[in-house]
Every structure is written in C-alpha cells, then in structure tokens.
C-alpha cells in the first residue's frame, strides 16, 4: 500500500489515452497492488475518484468512492467502485451544469456540463462484468473519471471558463450556486 504521486494539469499523461487492461493480467499482484494504491491515494487526498492517468499509469482503471467527503459536503454517497475497461453510454440527451474539482487541478473548481444519466459497463477487480445505471452526481463522477482515461480533463468540457475558481474564492462567492442560467 502506498500513496502515489498525482500528475497535475500540464503533465502530458493527462492528455493521453489509457489502454485496456488485459483480462489475464487483471488478477496479477502488480495490477491488484496498483488498484489498492489508487484507493489509498484517493482517500489520502479526499478525491471522489481517481483514474490511472492521474497516477502516471496509462491503464483503464478508475476508482470511485464518495463517503462523507469534505470536498463535496452535499454529495450523495457512492460505494467504493473499482472500474476496469469502462464504457459509458448516455441514457438521456439532458445535460446539467455542476461544480467539479480534480486532484490533478488542485484547489480549483469549475462548472461542467454532464449527462444526467449514464450506463456504465465495466469489469470489477476480479474481472466480472458489471453494469450500473447512474444519475446525477454518480453519473457526473463516472463521466469525469472515464474522461480521464480518454485524456480529457474537466476544464476541456467547460462551456464558460469564467466559472473557473480558486477554492478559497469559490467558498466565498460561489458555494451553493449550482446553476447560473437555464
Ligand atoms: Ni479528475
């Protein structure tokens, strides 16, 4: 178990595509240790999720968990989910703006449009196929993390960079404001 170094905006690894994990390698100690280390790293930095790219590993692995998270005080809780080789399908055309942060963009928040409902197909850490239909905040986190695996950072999805805020200013001026318009 180890806390891994998190790549920050500007590191090329965040703009690269992660590769699928071969199913015959998933249960090897090296991959299972990487998953454990990613969980530890997510917990250490109070992230809602962490993707392989963020720890310099171009493997399609993401971990998601939200439980009494001080960075997302209003968020629902999401059980620990280890996502291998995910595919995401939008279940609606409806998109909603909402605040996001990212361990790779420290101390910042921005308003990002996301589909309000998605289906996530993936393998769990044992290699079993899983499928979950998610909405609202869970759907948002899924889209954020799977974007990472495709080399996309949330700022790339923002429609208006004027909401991009340092956390200290965000707490003063934006906290509680969910939507500016529409
Ligand atoms: Ni992120």
Image (cartoon, helix red, strand yellow):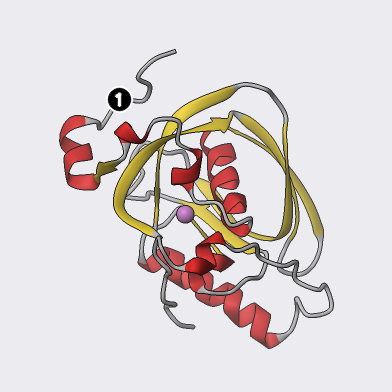
Q: Tell me where residue 24 appears, x and y as whole percent.
A: 84, 78
Q: Tell me where residue 119 appears, x and y as whole percent.
A: 72, 39
What residue sits 55% from the left and 66% below the top? Answer: 53
Does residue 11 appear left or right of residue 73 in this picture?
right
Q: Tell me where residue 181 appears, x and y as whole percent.
A: 39, 15
Q: Residues within 10 Å of mark 1 (few under 14, many from 20)?
A: few
Going by the picture, which residue comes out furthest to the top? 182
What residue sits 58% from the left and 67% below the top? Answer: 52
What residue sits 62% from the left and 52% below the top? Answer: 146
Q: Front-most of 146 and 29?
A: 146
Answer above or below: position of 133 versus 102: above
Answer above or below: position of 110 versus 147: above
- The quadrant in which residue 171 appears is top left
Residue bearing the label numbered 1: 177
Total count of labels? 1
Q: Front-most of 24 and 181?
A: 181
Going by the picture, which residue comes out furthest to the bottom? 29
What residue sits 45% from the left and 64% below the top? Answer: 42
Q: Tell me where residue 10 appears, x and y as whole percent.
A: 41, 63
User: Which element is circle 1 on?
Assistant: loop
């Amino acid at each position: 178990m180890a806390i891994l170094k998190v790549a920050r905006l500007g590191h090329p690894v965040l703009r690269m595509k992660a590769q699928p994990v071969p199913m015959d390698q998933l249960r090897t100690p090296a991959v299972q240790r990487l998953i454990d280390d990613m969980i530890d790293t997510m917990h250490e930095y109070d992230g809602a999720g962490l993707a392989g790219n963020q720890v310099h590993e171009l493997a399609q692995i993401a971990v998601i968990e939200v439980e009494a998270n001080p960075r997302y005080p209003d968020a629902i809780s999401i059980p620990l989910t280890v996502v291998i080789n995910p595919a995401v399908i939008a279940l609606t055309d409806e998109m909603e703006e909402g605040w996001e942060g990212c361990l790779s963009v420290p101390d910042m928040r921005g308003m990002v449009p996301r589909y309000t409902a998605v289906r996530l197909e993936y393998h769990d850490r044992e290699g079993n196929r899983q499928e979950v239909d998610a909405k609202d905040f869970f759907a948002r986190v899924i889209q954020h993390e799977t974007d990472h695996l495709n080399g996309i950072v949330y700022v790339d999805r923002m429609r208006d960079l004027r909401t991009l805020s340092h956390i200290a200013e965000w707490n003063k001026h934006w906290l509680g404001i969910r939507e500016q318009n529409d």
